[in-house]
Image: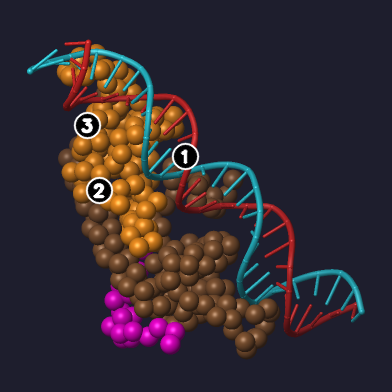
Chain colours: A brown, B orange, C cyan, D red
Amino acid sequence: MHRRGCGWRWQGCSQRAVRFLEPALLLLLHHGPAHGYTLLERLESFGLGRFDPTVVYRTLREMEERGWVASSWDREQTQGPPRRVYRLTPLGDEVLHFWVQDLEETRRMVEDFLQAYYQHVKEHPMEEGT
Amino acid sequence: MHRRGCGWRWQGCSQRAVRFLEPALLLLLHHGPAHGYTLLERLESFGLGRFDPTVVYRTLREMEERGWVASSWDREQTQGPPRRVYRLTPLGDEVLHFWVQDLEETRRMVEDFLQAYYQHVKEHPMEEGT
DNA sequence: CCACACTATGTGCAATTTGTCAATAGTCAA
DNA sequence: TTGACTATTGACAAATTGCACATAGTGTGG
């Protein structure tokens, strides 16, 4: 059972606390238009894990439905079938901004949590409900 | 539509990137045994949002199934019906430790993301796929 | 030409997770 | 004995996610 995917739990523990896909895609598109396949690859460079292509494509289409991105078919075939090129919309730019604020808050929360943890274990090495 | 719950989206955008409930409960229990109702209240002091009681109780029971916490009924009634007292198990303590490592990584990811964002917008104020 | 590998995207479904509504149950006060 | 508050739980609907598979164009080797 090689822990891929998300619903998984190492010993029953959820593996990652963060949902990064949407903001990451928005940020990548902020750099300029791109098609899904490329975004898929760039996501990994981001330090985020490996994504299932299906999930990425689906997310892009959902974001398009919400008006955050817009797509058109790329006429100049390089290799393979026609590909859909996504670009950020002004709304998507705003949403990215909201995401950034959310992540700022998230950062504070994570830091508070970690600080509370370290502080507590420093004072009480192990004080379970004995 | 007062954004409670999770599947919600302000303008279609998912509300929070982080799942904090489990680690927060573990940390709170690291301070000592407590019952669900109390934990419920303390979660808010943590800066995390408001949680639905049902969700918290369910999470506690799931954590018990996994052996992270153990519970017993509190005999000394203060007010209301008997309440279940949860305490951290040694396994739960380990899991908390894993969670902390996960959150450390999360912190790095969030910081990298934010840094990448600020860096990029500084250089390219708005460069959508025009 | 045909099989095959690679690029590129999409469908459908099952499993998991999450939210919500409502039920139960004890205590206390009017 | 009704209602308000404490405390926990059950059941089901809705949302999310992973995954297996389908489609489709391009280029290569036999």
Residue shown at 36% from the left, 57% from the top? B9
Looking at the rendered structure, the kind of residue marked 3 is: Thr
Q: Is residue A97 left or right of residue B62?
A: left
Question: For this rendering, which residue is in front, A55 or B10?
Answer: B10
- Check contact, mark 3 vs mark 1: CB within 8 A: no
At label 2, the amino acid type is Leu
Q: Is residue A56 visible?
A: no
Residue B1 drawn in magenta: no
For the residue pair B108 and C3, the one nearer the viewer reads as: C3
Residue B28, image quadrant: top left
Looking at the rendering, in which quadrant would you find the C terminus of chain B?
A: bottom left
Element carrying mark 3: helix
By secondary structure, the bulk of the magenta-drawn segment is best described as helix
Q: Quadrant of residue A89?
A: bottom left
Span colored in magenta: B108-130
Q: Is residue D8 left or right of residue D30?
A: left
Circle 1 is placed at which residue position? A12
Q: Which mark is residue B38?
A: 3
The residue lying at 43 percent from left, 67 percent from top is: A66
Residue at mark 2 to residue at mark 3: CA–CA distance = 15 Å
